[in-house]
Amino acid sequence: MFKNIFSQKSGKSKTGFYKIESNRLIGIDEISGNGSINSVIEYLGYPTNHIHIIITFNSNKIDCMGFKTLSRELVFVLAKNKEIAVSFTDVSTEILNIDWSYEYSSLNVEDILNEGIKLQNFSLSFLKSVLDLRPEGENLFISNKLDLYFKFENELLITFSDIGFTNSSTKWLDKINTHMVRQMTEEARLYHNNEIDIIEEVNKQSQAILNIPDVVNNEFIYLHKKQNGNVNFYNLLLTHYTHNCNVIDFLFVNKGRYNQIDDSTYIVGNFIYTFDKEGKLDIVINN
């Protein structure tokens, strides 16, 4: 635990760390423990993954800067040499040199969000403080800044998805058969109440298509064709080729379109699907 409050004097910091407050640098005089960056982040009241660290390699005075994750809100600065004073002008100059398109590239943002989901600490309130979230449905928000959908459960981020179809298999299918993708999407929209789930169902169907032999003339297509003309390629693949499926994914793709016989057995179209105790597909028989 820190023993002293922040120094009210400008100029040097005894530890090299400065807190940002009202466009002023306030030095931290003393740090207990190992004096690490993570210790400072936690003392300032943040989980460590809520602060994005940027190393300032070309600066003569500043070692790194910590920004509120996914934002440009500066939280603290670490000097390279605690014997040399750092001014806010020094900090402002370094901020101008930051390549934000790199720091918050799509890959980096994906890593940041996945870590927040894993740690279960990206709350709706936190993400609202750094992103332009607006509601799109129950527990669903959209950020036009990042072109992402965000889904929450109990006020915590549980998943995110690009706006539109960015899955490679769906993009491929859309190029060769836009009508099929449109029909799949319209069907999924009947059974799912948010865009993330709608997109995910279509993605699973398009991924299945890539793994079905001679899909255009496949001998089993007629067995999985529905009244609306769509084909359940996901069920076709697992029924006749792989059997590689868990009950959660199965029920998701077939949501609203299956009849349940018991706790482990379901009917979809012409087939009965039975899952084992681990939730893996076990037996498929003709209905």
Image (cartoon, rainbow, N blue to C red):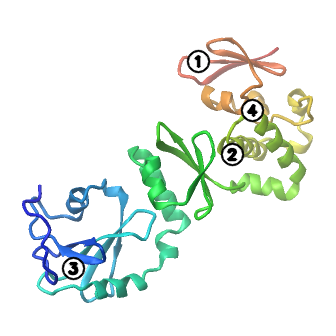
Amino acid identity at mark 4: Tyr
Amino acid identity at mark 1: Asp
Q: Which residue has dot 2 on it? A: 195
Q: Which residue has dot 4 on it? A: 191
Question: Based on the displayed image, in which of its 4 quarters is residue 143 positioned?
Answer: bottom right
Whether residues under marks 2 and 3 lie with C-beta atoms below 8 angstroms apart, the answer is no
Q: Earlier in the sequence, mark 4 or mark 1?
A: 4
Q: Which residue has dot 1 on it? A: 276
The image position of residue 78, as x and y in percent, is 23, 75
- Residue 54 placement, left or right of 193: left
Disc 1 crowd rating (10 Å Cα; few below 14, some 14-19, many 20+) is: few
In the figure, 133 relative to 222: above or below?
below
Q: Residue drawn at (88%, 33%), measured in percent from left and top?
A: 221
Kindly report the distance in space between the C-alpha atoms of the residues bearing marks 2 and 3: 45 Å
Q: Earlier in the sequence, mark 2 or mark 3?
A: 3
Amino acid identity at mark 3: Ala
Disc 2 crowd rating (10 Å Cα; few below 14, some 14-19, many 20+) is: many
Q: Quadrant of the N terminus?
A: bottom left
Q: Residue drawn at (81%, 53%), measured in percent from left and top?
A: 173
Kindly report the distance in space between the C-alpha atoms of the residues bearing marks 3 and 1: 59 Å
- Residue 78 placement, left or right of 257: left
